[in-house]
Amino acid sequence: MSPSAERDVLGYGQQAVDEPADTVLEDRATGYGLRVAQATPSRDTAPKAKRKTATDLLISDRTYPDLARDSAVYAEQILRMKEEQRQTGHLLVSSWEELANKLGEYDTIDHLVLMFHGAPGCVQVGNTLKGLSSVSSLFTEKRPRVDKIDLEGCCIGRAPDELVAFGQLLKAKTITAFNYYWCSFSSDPFPSTADVRTIEDTLKPYEGYLLPGTPSATTIASRKKEYRPIVEWFRLVDVRDKEGRPEPLPPRPAAGDDSARKETFKPRSEARARRINFTEAEKVAGEFKGPGMPYDFMPFERVIIDLTAPADVSK
């Protein structure tokens, strides 16, 4: 898949530019070459910098305040990082080169989460959208060995064939992504003086759509400090207003049928886990591109690709 073909389906409508990385080789041959060759070789006795390890590492985009905000709450509520853990476990970057350099500082990562704007099979870092099968030139031999990768962004999972090469580049066992557009908003923060009833009344219309791990109203009130809840939802198609903003999630009606809202706006909990082998990724990508897709029907799925071994076709 060509990343440029997907520029018009960015989750948040950001204009992206595909900039394939070129490897720049500097010619270091100089007039000093002979002299260096004749000199007595010296031993490098400086200690090698020890590369890091991480249990959970979340990297997002500082370019966009919404991602910086949401990823911080994600780190706390979904990854359960304590404040001191977030100091090193939640990183922000603004370019593909910076992302590659940050990852190069690690030897092993158990769980890597990349939260960026996206398109089918593509991730946008800063203003650059790239297909995940075409970024290997950015990563040197100093790249981590990752156990599992989660991609949090709009419809990246619609092109699972593009994800395989990236997962294999980092020697991951699994790589996961959603096939729907992902949207969110943050309500005004509750002040430290907010009471339980006020918090309950504010959150109730969005029950089921709050970011997993959102504390109860009682817990929020007991903390005696400001708290900003995150509401998220997933959609089959990207619908926007005149200002280019995603159509907001309507609050649950006080009475009556709520099925129409649920049909259009999907909570994270409704994603079907679809586990496939990496040898099946191209076939599944073809399904997502089939006649009428995605507008006729496409189930809301969290595509989980097993990268460890080919499927057993004898079964």
Image: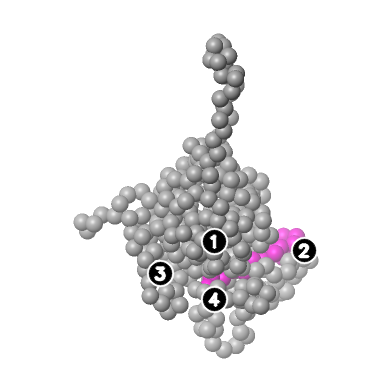
- The magenta-colored residue range is 220-235
- Residue shown at 36% from the left, 60% from the top: 282
- The answer to whether 24 is drawn above or below residue 255 in the figure is above
Query: In terms of sequence position, does the residue under pointer 4 or pointer 3 come before the other?
Result: 4
Q: Position of residue 152 (x, y in %)?
A: 54, 59
Q: Are marks 4 and 1 in contact (CB under 8 Å)?
A: no
Amino acid type of the residue tagged 3 in the rendering:
Lys
Structural crowding at the residue carrying mark 4, measured as other residues with C-alpha within 10 Å and reported as few (<14), some (14–19) or many (≥20): many
* Inter-mark Cα distance, 3 to 2: 49 Å
Question: To which residue does mark 1 refer?
Answer: 118
Q: Amino acid at mark 1?
A: Gly
Q: Which residue is mark 2?
A: 192
- Secondary structure of the residue carrying numbered label 2: loop
Which of the two labelled residues, at mark 4 and mark 1, occupies the earlier sequence position?
Answer: 1
Q: Earlier in the sequence, mark 4 or mark 2?
A: 2
On the question of residue 87 being in view, the answer is: yes
Disc 4 from disc 3: Cα separation: 22 Å
Q: Position of residue 249 (x, y in %)?
A: 61, 76
Q: Residue furthest left?
A: 314
